[in-house]
Structures are given as structure tokens and as C-alpha cells.
Image: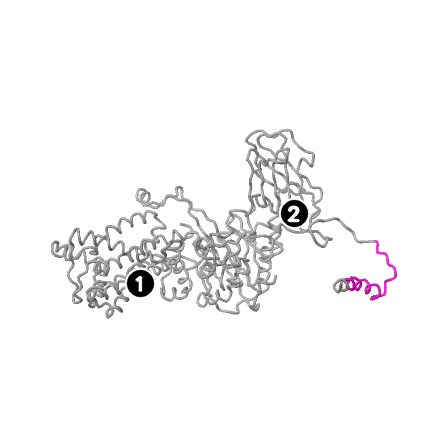
Amino acid sequence: MGSPAVVIDGVSKRFRMYHERNQSLKAAVMRGRRAKFDEFWALKDVSFEIPRGSTFGLIGENGSGKSTLLKCVAKILRPDKGSVAIDGSVAALLELGSGFHPELSGRENVYLNASILGMKKSEIDARFDEIVDFAGIGEFIDQPVKNYSSGMYVRLGFSVAINVDPDILLVDEVLAVGDANFQDKCMEKFADFRRAGKTVVLVSHTMGSLRTMCDEAAWLKHGSLVEVGAANDVVDEYVDEGHVERVELVDGGSRWGSGEAQLTKIELLDANERATTRVHTGDAITFRLHFATTKPIDKPVFGLALETVTGVYAWAHHSRDGQYVPDRIEGVGTIDLQVPALALQEGMYDLNASIVDYTTTHTFDFLRSCLRFDVISRTPHESGGIAVLGGRWGNLAETKAPEPGRTAEPRAKTPTRRRSRQASQ
Amino acid sequence: MPGCGHGRSGLPNGDDRLGGREQDIFGGRGGDVPVSVLADLGSSRDLLTNLTLREIRSKYKRTALGQLWSLLNPIAQMATYSVVFSFLLRAQPDKGSPSGLDVFALWLSAGLLPWLFFSNAVTTGMGSLVSNANLIKKVYFPREALVVANTLSWLFTFSIEMAVLVVAILIFGGSPLLYLPATVFFMLVLAVFALGVSFLLAIANVYFRDTQHFVAIAMQVWFYATPIVYPISIVADKHHQLLALYRINPLERFGEVFRDTMYNGRWPSWSNTVYTVLVSACVLVVGYVVFKRYEGRLAEEL
């Protein structure tokens, strides 16, 4: 649609890596300058355009400069070379509720935060109810936000940011906020956004969501642009290159346990034993758990569970039920769970992993949402839900069709009549 | 889902909410020239209002006396200095002329309140970037708004204090009302001066955290180097050569100006007027230019 919303032209960004983070005058005077530092180019001559009205993804490994680029577009960082030209108002969802003052009420903070994001008072007035509704804060709006639960805090922050209604929205993997219900509302809001012809720039590690949400994508590697183009093509190449991302705790993940044995890394491997976060329905896959112990553990039990990102419990299996319990583990090692044919429908899934003792009452380590991956369906695919049953339609046998009206009528009426009789008694 | 109703049409550029900020091209080198400070601040008026309100509201949040503290503080200081300097050290300022007032506490307050405003605004303004580091690293907005809002919040407090002082002087028979426009004008000039200094120190404090400790000491020295708790006549009588040096200090000039309009009940001298206005304007311009020059790297340095 016409001119691009964002033109990134030869952008380079240099960071200084200080050897000692000593911002003191004495140190500066002693050395005759501020501090020794190494230069590090986080972005190197990156140029591309983001078309107006598109949803644009930025992909790349950690440290590839995605977030730096996003911050340059958001004007938080200033490029050392090149320029970013933006046509339209911008709002960035980098951290939610970052402008909140804990002692002030939700109401005061909404006004404060919205004005920091560039809204005028009249606009905030007009949208205030919508903001509070969307966040689901209700009567707590006049309480100081320090009394809010972390969920409420983040929801209010998200609600303010999304209601700024910018022409260009920058999102840095903050979508994993709130409960399933709130996530649905967020996705709905994003859909609204795209329908309204606004531009969304998304940084994400989840290839599936990038494929489904984005029209175009840019791939960054060590600060340089590798490719830009249709999202599907770029994601394909990214995955094909073997540049699969490292396994790490998904934001919002958590862990607990006594720690004598710890899960150091969780991998999802495809049939060729390559780590991936994108698999197809029916694929043979392997979950590989890397562990390390601080002391020998007798008869440990490894467990895995899957949830959809919306929080539906989909599957679980532990190694005691799997009748595979090693007598003892010590030091560092791995254990696999092999799935011959993945019977999951298309969607995004979160993996929980754990090491517990034989009685499964003592937890050594529990990792919640330690791996998020996408399942992509192959044609022919089944229509919906979580599970793939491999069901086949067939055996169509025709008998004479009943005349419409006759058979349906009494069935529909009988309960009604019964009910009305009961009511009159 | 219903509930997130979207009243707006699907036109991507159907409105011009952000007015002048709609088209924003930046990049290249840092340190763009301040085309118009006022226009810049005008476009973020609502932001300034809200940031200022945040400062004012949060300052005395969860205190039983609330905003009263902003009055109790200067009153306590005034009482202390009155006892020490008037009773113990026998500092004797000239009678207010032509007002004829002879109340040490009032004379002191007319000089002390502007100093307290300046000192508070500068000390907290210096930390305004560092204490909002989280915000600066995550959201783009005109960074100078933080410093300006800080000065404005103290200007609000200062105004209340001065209003109380006006009433007090009226009770004791002074005539500050006639010169009130001049008082208000010089309060704004002093705010400009404080803002300029805040800009400089706020930036300096980001790059060298020593600044805040250094300034704390400097403020002490500056306070006693300014004839606030003692009359300048002490210096003028005994150390002629020092007087010229004293007169360089803009705060000395401000003190004189406020004592004229509040305590003495006369118009301030032209030389003081010109000096304070010029110095304040220069400091603001320098402060703003320096601020803009180093503002670009704030998110990295914090």
C-alpha cells in the first residue's frame, strides 16, 4: 500500500563494552579518559523497508541484533550510521508497565503511561474505560498499582500500550502475558490492528507464529541482514540453514526443585537428530533432556508434559510409567523420549520437564515452559482440536432419507411440552 | 472478542493525532540544534503535565501530613536559621525600605525560599534521568520532559511557599501585592536558571555518578557563599574586594531581587534584572544544547 511505513537505511549501531563498569570521575581522571572499552557492532549496515499495513517479522539468533534494531526504530537507541525514517506514530511494546509508579493509583498511572507513550489527555479520556475493561482491572483501578498482582500490572501495561493505537506497533516477544483468556484478547487486538491496515513489527523466536502472523520477515545474523522477503520463504531458509535457536527458558517460564539434579538443556530433535522448534504432525521426534547432578541420584524419574500455549493440558509421560528407570545417575548425561509419530494438531506447545525421585513426591528440578515449539500440519490434515487420531471418513451407506419435518418435529416438541407442563404444575 | 470494540475506520492514516511529530526522520550524528525549545515542549504538554503531577503526588504519598510537609520543611529551616543567626550570631539586616519591616524571619524567608527551590530542583533534577533509567531504556519520549517536569513540580511547591510568605508579610504590614507580578516573573526566571543547571547536571550524572556527591558538597558551599542567612552588608563593610566576587553569583542577585519585591517592597534594580535574565537564558541554552548533544546515548549509558 503505497509508501513504506519504515525505511531502514544503512543502519549501524555500535555498543561500547566497558572493561570495568566504573563510572567515576576519579577513574576518568586517572586514566585521562572515561573508561577503556571495546567496540562492538550490534548492527552492520542494515537496510530494508517495511511496507505499510504489513505485519513484519524480525528473526535471528540471540544477539543477532533484532532487539537493537527494534529499539532503533522505536527511537530509544540512535544509530551511529545510517537512518531510520518512520512515517506515522510509533508505539513499542518492549516492556509492559515500565512507566508505572508503584505508589500511584491505576488511574493515575494509566494517564501517566499513556502520555509517555504520546497520547493526549482528551484521547486518554476517550479510551479510559476501554483500557480498564481490556485489562480486566475493574474496581482496583483506584488502588495503588503496588497492590496489583503481577498479572494485573502487566495486563494494564499492555492495555495502555495497545490502546495508544499507533500507526506502527513494535512488539518484542511480550505476547506471552496473562492467562489464556487474556492472550486470546491480545491476539484479537492484533488481528484488529492488522485489519485496520496498521503496521506491526514483531520480534519472535517462535517460527510458527511468525509464519502464521507475518507477511514479510527479515533475518539478521551477527548484526547483518541475511535476507528479507516473504515470511514463509525467509523462515524456511532460516530453519534450513540449521540456524535453529538455542533452547532456553521461554519468557515467563519458571523452575523449582531441590537442585541435586538439574536439567541443563531440553532439546527437540527432528528425525535427523537436528534441534528444531518446528515440527510437522506425524513426524518422528525426540525430546532430549540434558542433566547434571551434584551428587548421585538413585532411581530418578524423568517427566515431560505438554500444554498448548493457551494452557490446555495436552499430554504427559514420565519414565517410571515408561518403565525406564536407571538405577543411578551421576554427573552429566542425557536421556531421550522418542515419539515415533507426533499425534498433535497444528499449534504452539509448551513443554514442562522434570526430574523427580522414584516416589515422584520429591522434585529435584522442574522446568515450566522450558521449550516452546510449533507443530505444523501436513495435508491432508484433521480439522481441529489438539490430538490427531488418524481418523478416516468412509463407508458412506445411503438409506432412504427421512422426510424433513416429520421426524424432527416431535423430538423437538416433546421436551418443550414436558417442560411447560412442569412449569404449570 | 467483543469488549475491545474498535470504533475507528480502517484507514491507516485517517487522523493526525500526533500533529507535528507525525513525520519524524532522524539518524546521522547526534546533537541536533535546538530549533525551538518552546515548540518542542509545547507538543508534549500533556506528558509534562502528567509527569509533573506524578512528581507532586508521589513526593508525599503515604505521609500523614501529605502536601503540608512542603510547608513544614521550609518553616523548620527558617526557624532554625532564625535562632542561630538572629539570636545567637546577631545578624542584623537593614530594615525593609521602604516597607519598614523589621522581622528577621520574613527577611530570611524572602531569600531562603528561592534558594530552597533552586537547591531542591537542581539536586533532584540531577538524578531525574538516572532514577528513570528503566523508562528511558524501554520507551521513547522526549527525555527533557523528565527534567522539566521535575523543575515544574518544585515550582509548584515554591509557589505555595511564596503565597504563604506573601500573606505573612501582609500581616506584618508589608506591601508585597503591588510587586507580585515582578515576584512571579522572577520566580519563572529562577526556574529557567534551575532548569538549565539541571539539564547540565542530569547529563553529567549519567556519565559520572560522582556528580551527585560533588554537587551535594557544592550546594553547601554555595548556600553559605550566598548572602541568605546573613546580610550582604557584612561582606560589603569588611571585605570590599570580595563584594565584586559575590555579585557574580546569580543566586545573590536572585536573593536581592526577591527581597526587594517581597520584603523591601520596591522594584528590583535594572542591573539585577538584566543580569538574572541574561544569565538564566544563557544557562538554559547551554544546558539544553548539552542535553541534546548527549541525549542520544542515554539508553546505552544508563
Q: Which mark is residue A82?
A: none
The mark found on residue A313 in the picture is 2
Would you name the residue on which mark 1 appears?
B159
The answer as to whether the residues below labels 2 and 1 share one chain is no
Q: Is residue B201 left or right of residue A108?
A: left
Residue appearing at x 73%, y 53% in the figure: A382
> What is the secondary structure assignment of the residue under circle 2?
strand
Q: Residue at the location (35% across, 53% down)?
A: B203
Is residue A278 depicted above or below B147 in this figure? above
The chain holding disc 2 is A
All told, the count of numbered labels is: 2
The range drawn in magenta is: A395-418
Percent position of residue A42, x then y: 47, 49
Q: Residue A166 appears at what percent x and percent y?
A: 51, 63
Q: Position of residue A250 (x, y in %)?
A: 56, 46
- Contact between marks 2 and 1 (CB within 8 A): the answer is no
